[in-house]
Image (spheres, rainbow, N blue to C red):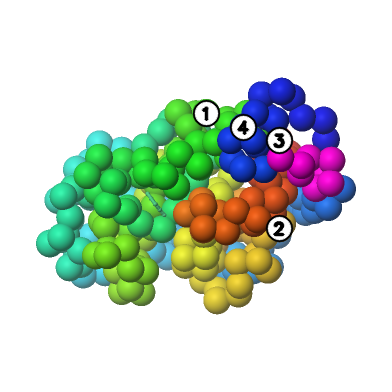
Amino acid sequence: MALTPQQQAYLTSMGVTVWADQSAPDIVQPAPVTSDSVSPTPVAGFGGNPGASKTPSLNLDITSLDWTDLADMVSTCTACDLHTGRTQAVFGVGNQHADLLIVGEAPGAEEDRHGEPFVGRAGQLLNEMLRAIGLQRESVYIANILKCRPPNNRDPKPEEAEQCVAYLYQQIALLKPKLIVAVGRIAAQRLLKTDTALSKLRSKVHVLAETQTPFVVTYHPAYLLRAPLEKRKAWQDLLFVKKTLASTQ
Ligand code: URA
């Protein structure tokens, strides 16, 4: 694929200098959407299992909530212990009519302070990654599995994700994205309900069982900051995202 000067500039800012010509032949073409990695059973509400649309400890059906009511509910949520340590809940940000939803793991310290996902260093890299495929941060929607910051940036506990993921499902139901991109192992494995390694989940279109939304995965930008050589693979993933998105139009 020939890179535009703008793409080349963004790749350089991502720390990648020589990928384009080498990586393009390796791109896996988007397969037709399959449900091989997850149960295809639809969920009521957006229609299928109501359990997916409740935070277990609150046991409330949230499938009728609009963006405003959902955000209000998240901002006062006490469904798990994480609420005790938060500055504020981090609901999500972006275009509520976006075709693309980016899902990360959980807010970090800066996100907790600002009330917005991906505003720290990882967020800056995420912005560059989006720009590299011609997308502005403002044109997509960005959310996390957890809405509250885990202490010391530890991994989410399964029970915390269990409580919180219902909010994300309702965000997806409202947004109706054409494609979801999970960044990082935690978001990918939690949403696909698998413990398959992230490297094996890449380059393939999965389906999010609860909403039947096409779903792809890539590396977390925080991981890419620690392992810059992996940015080559992330670039392949980004091209795959772009192609998959184009094929859904
Ligand atoms: N990492 C995430 O997964 N989400 C954020 O919002 C910030 C960092």
Mark 1: amino acid: Gln
Give me the C-alpha separation between circle 1 and circle 3: 16 Å
Give me the C-alpha separation between circle 3 and circle 4: 21 Å
| Foreground residue among 31 and 10 | 10
Q: At which x and y percent is residue 60?
A: 23, 60
Left or right: where 70 falls relative to 175: left
Look at mark 3 in the image and give the residue it sits on: 246
Q: Residue at x 74, y 24 (%)?
A: 4
Left or right: where 133 falls relative to 192: right
Nearest to N terminus: mark 3 or mark 2: 2
Mark 3: amino acid: Ala
Mark 2: amino acid: Lys
Nearest to N terminus: mark 1 or mark 3: 1
Of the numbered discs in the image, which one, if any, rests on residue 10?
A: 4
Look at mark 2 in the image and give the residue it sits on: 204
Q: Residue at x 61, y 72 (%)?
A: 197
Give me the C-alpha separation between circle 3 and circle 2: 15 Å
Image mark count:
4
| Foreground residue among 226 and 58 | 226
Q: Residue at x 27, y 52 (%)?
A: 109
Left or right: where 201 falls relative to 153: right
Q: Quadrant of the N terminus?
A: top right
Of the numbered discs in the image, which one, if any, rests on residue 136?
A: 1
- Range shown magenta: 17-24
Looking at this view, name the residue that lies furthest to the top: 5
Of the numbered discs in the image, which one, if any, rests on residue 80?
A: none
Give me the C-alpha separation between circle 1 and circle 2: 24 Å
Q: At which x and y percent is residue 164?
A: 31, 61
